[in-house]
Amino acid sequence: MGQTFQQLGQLLLRSIPTIIIFAALHFYLKRVLYRPLRKVLAARSERIEGKLAHAQQTLATAEAKLAAYESALRERRLAGYRSIEAQRQAAIAAGQTQLHDARHQTAASLVAARQELATESAQAKVRLQESANTLATQIMNQVLGKAATA
């Protein structure tokens, strides 16, 4: 076992330069390669996060503009519908007014026609009465004239 320890000691002595070179290489690579690489990766991460935040802000702005546009479009549609409804109500009111005027004119015409009919009926009765009186007189004259000659 003594020989194993002696071989192990010699192996350790021979590996000291390798350990020193390895440690020196580790510190050199840490300073020359890993620190700049970490800085580049951190800067890249910051740029990505910045661009992501900017994209999210742009997206939020676009969504706000879209909501405002849709709201304005909805309001204009409602204004259009209100305008159409107002025109429809105005047309209905105008139609009702025309219908009322037509009914009034028809009623006035009907009253005038009834009055004219009543006047004509009265005139016809007067003419019939006169004709009946004339005919009665003629009949009486003929009957009496034949009776007087007989």
Image (cartoon, rainbow, N blue to C red):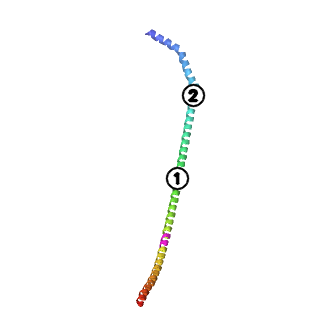
Which class describes the residues within 10 Å of circle 1: few (<14), some (14-19), or many (20+)?
Answer: few
The magenta stretch spans which residues? 105-110
Which class describes the residues within 10 Å of circle 2: few (<14), some (14-19), or many (20+)?
Answer: few
Q: Please name the residue shown 54% across and 46% down the image.
A: 66
What residue occupies the far bottom of the structure in this picture? 148
Q: Which residue is mark 2?
A: 37
Q: Mark 1 or 2, which is nearer the eye?
A: 1
Q: Given the image, on which type of amino acid does mark 2 rest?
A: Leu
Q: Is residue 79 above or below residue 135?
A: above
Residue 20: quadrant of the picture: top right
Q: Quick check: is 106 in the magenta stretch?
A: yes
Q: Secondary structure at mark 1?
A: helix
Screen quadrant of the C terminus: bottom left
Q: Secondary structure at mark 2?
A: helix
- By secondary structure, the bulk of the magenta-drawn segment is best described as helix
Q: Which residue is mark 1?
A: 77
Of residues 136 and 59, the one nearer the viewer is: 136
Where does residue 37 sit, x and y in percent of width and height? 57, 28
